[in-house]
Amino acid sequence: MISIKSVEIKELTPGHAPTFSKCLSEESEDYLKHFIPFAEYSEAYIKKILSEKKFDKYFGLFTGDEIVGFYMLRGFDAGFEIPSYGVWISSSYTNKGLSKLTLYHALSVCRLNNIKTLMLKVHPENEIAKNLYEKFGFVKVGIDEKIGHLIYHKNLANQSF
């Protein structure tokens, strides 16, 4: 009998911090070199973020109890009206459509909450991500002068996806 894996998206809680921290810490530096979601990946730091968030959202992608990716919509807690989307997929689970799944989920969450624009940043050399985001209708609007990443926006008002 074959075993069929499924994927579930759940909001991350402080209780997920140990597993989530371990997943990020086990990735190679090269794989994570352009992914800068947190100042550090320690369990304590991630638990603090997940404990103190008020309006920001952090979602995990799970196969069973294993975290295979996550995405976030953050910036609300800092007073921004336009959330910033960021995604990480475990290197063991790349090229399986999970990044696209998180984008569809994020766009739906934004629409359910009447959010009119979604923002993301991507390293200029990350062609795969840039192509994906542009296919989803994101438009380059600038450059983050601090880290050199390209800034993209997607207008969600009256657009289908």
Image (cartoon, rainbow, N blue to C red):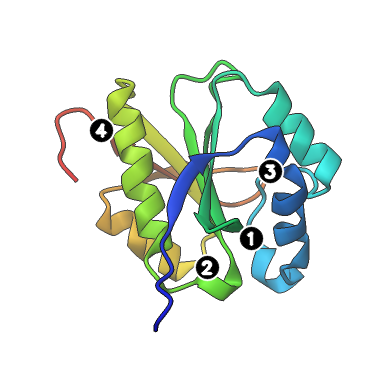
Q: Is residue 52 left or right of residue 55?
A: right
Q: Nearer the viewer, mark 3 or mark 2?
A: 3
Residue 133, compared with residue 56, is above or below; it is: below
* Mark pair 1, 3: CA separation: 23 Å
Q: Is residue 22 visible?
A: yes
Residue under numbered circle 1: 34
The 10 Å Cα crowd at callout 1, few under 14, some 14 to 19, many 20 or more, is some
Residue 23, compared with residue 84, is above or below; it is: below
Q: Is residue 131 left or right of residue 149?
A: left
- Sequence order check: which comes first, mark 4 or mark 2? 2
Residue under numbered circle 2: 125
* Mark pair 4, 2: CA separation: 26 Å
Q: Secondary structure at mark 4?
A: loop
Q: Residue at x 50, y 53 (%)?
A: 61
The spot of residue 43 in percent (x, y) is 82, 45
Q: Secondary structure at mark 2?
A: loop
Residue under numbered circle 3: 16
The amino acid type found where label 1 is placed reads His
Q: Secondary structure at mark 1?
A: loop
Q: Residue at x 47, y 30 (%)?
A: 83
Q: Are marks 3 and 4 in contact (CB under 8 Å)?
A: no
The 10 Å Cα crowd at callout 2, few under 14, some 14 to 19, many 20 or more, is few
